[in-house]
Image: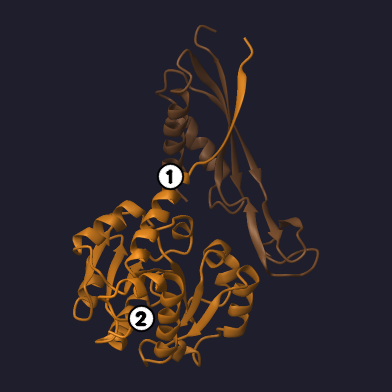
Chain colours: A brown, B orange
Amino acid sequence: MHELSLARSILRQVAELSDEYSDQHISAVELEVGLMSGVDADLLAISLKQEQVDLKRPWEFTIKVVPVTAYCSSCQSEFQIDSHAFICVRCGSTEVEVTGGDSVRIMSITVEDLDS
Amino acid sequence: MVGRTIVVRRDVQAEEKREADAERDLLGSRGTLVVNLVSSPGAGKTSLLAEIAQYWHGRHSMAVLVGDIETDRDAQRLAPFVPVTQLTTGGACHLELPLVYRGRMALGDPQVDFLFIENIGNLVCPASHDLGEHLRVVLLSVTDGDDKPAKYPKMFRTSHALIVSKCDLLNYVPFRTEEAIRDARAIQPNLSCFEVSALKRLGISDLCRYLESERLRRVGSAIRENSDESITT
């Protein structure tokens, strides 16, 4: 996908989040990249570093790559999708719904006092 | 100084998805079925749209927003058959909602039965962008190769229908239709599959019947509510 524009969007959203903590600043951001998000985690990391060059208070970040997970409505089990086989590993049903691994998410932020 | 960690769990594309939902609801409430047509470059999206427009002439109204990196050649090709606006990205390899919205406004915000968005020829990036469509239809031409569903899983996973195009060339290329469909359905079991040749006008009526039934199924309540519009116009 477009890791650079995604990085800019993340910077904008982190700035929005930081507005909620007026006397503190964001020191770290934890990100999650799903294997089916269409996003390359390494390229996103490079883009995030590049986009933070001019920030007064850049933040540390970690990117965790997570597998695609799904829920089977036939046998009510949750499982991991490997090799893009969207079939329940337990009962073989194809009535499966993707529950994770198809997006990029800001999982958490760490805030610190401004004078620290 | 130890920081305080706050759980956020925010989908970075959440705003884009909300805007797409709003667009889908708005057009659906008017009885317009929005179709996002995707494929690799040269798979026959424009030729197919020209055939659909001629098939529905006098029966269903439609409009096309056609995306390309450069030129308005596709808009020129479609203009004799259907109201069309060219969306030129100037380099970007996929369409995003703001450009689609501007294109719809440039076309006079048409009240039509079907609004087709012909995406940029690319099986990668368009898969990650919701354009507010009700239906995502992926075109796979027999000259593309039957291995493409397995190679571009996200596009096929996020599609509702698969159209195998240029079927008139099947005698000349080593394309195994059954294997392509089997691979695609392993990724998306609910995929509706069609085989067409726009050049020889084969399979167009089956495809159009499917699109008509999807319109009734997905936005049909709006059609019945809008009494000034008849389903059979």
Compute the Cα span from label 1 to label 2.
33 Å
Residue at left 48%, top 55%? B128
Where is B200 relative to B131, above or below? Answer: below
Is residue B146 something that shows in the picture?
A: yes
> Given the image, on which type of amino acid does mark 1 rest?
Glu
Callout 2: SS: helix
> Given the image, on which type of amino acid does mark 2 rest?
Leu
Could you say which is closer to the camera, residue B178 or residue B130? B130
Name the disc covering residue A76, or none.
Answer: none
Could you say which is closer to the camera, residue B200 or residue A100? A100
Q: Is residue B180 left or right of residue B61?
A: right
Name the disc covering residue B48, or none.
Answer: 2
Q: Is residue B168 left or right of residue A41?
A: left
Q: Chain of mark 2?
A: B
Residue at left 39%, top 69%? B41
Other-residue count near label 2 (Cα within 10 Å), few / some / many at <14 / 14–19 / ≥20: many
Q: Chain of mark 1?
A: B
Place of residue A92 in the rendered image (x, y in percent of width and height, measured from the top left): 77, 70
User: Dot 1 corresponds to which residue?
Assistant: B15
Place of residue B157 in the rendered image (x, y in percent of width and height, measured from the top left): 57, 65
Dividing the picture into quarters, in which one does residue B37 lie?
A: bottom left
Is residue A82 something that shows in the picture?
A: no
Place of residue A70 in the rendered image (x, y in percent of width and height, measured from the top left): 68, 57
Of label 1 and label 2, which has the lower sequence position? Answer: 1
Place of residue B28 in the rendered image (x, y in percent of width and height, measured from the top left): 37, 65
Residue at left 51%, top 68%? B159
| The C terminus of chain A, quarter of image | top right
Callout 1: SS: helix
Could you say which is closer to the camera, residue A84 or residue B136? B136
Residue at left 42%, top 36%? A8
